[in-house]
Amino acid sequence: MITTNTDSQKNEKIVTINCQFLNQMKLGSEFNATACINCGTCTAICPMEINLLPRQLFRYVLIGAEEKVLENVNNIYSCLLCRMCEENCPAGVHIAENVRSLRTYINREVYGLSRS
Ligand code: SF4
Ligand code: SF4
């Protein structure tokens, strides 16, 4: 675990980094967001107006910010898996599959369930 500051202002929020998080996420799933260019198209087009999904949550996974992902369980389960974002993603990120992977991880690690 690595602990780091993400904000230089007075009310700094310390984020704990889990270096194994990405590998844990990939267990039994096809999570892959490395092609994301953080363009924001997915956020702009999402009918649920979920600002975090998918780009910011995917970024949290890539940097190992597990606790930031777990703070957003409700957002993750609010996704309709409609794939509107995915259809318009210029980088071809499999967004809906990644959201399924997030749910699989939460079900396994938080709720102790073996399948999403
Ligand atoms: S539309 Fe695709 S490339 Fe753009 S932020 Fe979303 S996931 Fe990343
Ligand atoms: S798949 Fe989920 S994140 Fe993407 S547009 Fe649909 S509701 Fe929004």
Image: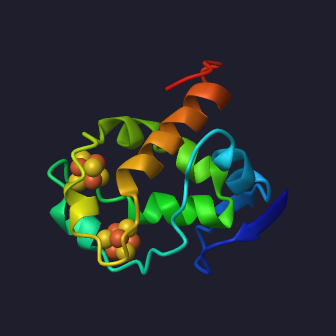
The picture quadrant where one finds residue 106 is top right
Q: Position of residue 21 (x, y in %)?
A: 72, 52
Left or right of residue 83: residue 30 = right
Q: Which image quarter holds the N terminus?
A: bottom right
Residue at the (40%, 42%) spot, across then down? 76
Residue 53 visible at all: no
Where is residue 16? Give x, y as percent. Answer: 74, 57
Q: Nearer the viewer, residue 22 or 7?
A: 22
Residue 113 can be seen, yes or no: yes
> Residue 97, position in %: x, y?
42, 48
> In the drawing, does residue 77 fall left or right of residue 86?
right
Q: Which image quadrant is residue 44 in? A: bottom left
Q: Is residue 101 above or below residue 15?
A: above
Image coloring type: rainbow
Give the farthest residue toward the right: 1
User: Of residues 93 and 64, which is closer to you in this image?
Assistant: 93
Q: What number of labels is visible?
A: 0
- As rendered, which of 69 and 97 lies closer to the eye? 97
Residue at x 36%, y 70% (from the top left corner): 92
Residue 65 lies, in percent from the top left, at 65, 58
| 26 up-or-down from 116: above or below | below
Measuring 75% from the left and 69% from the top, which residue is drawn there?
Answer: 4
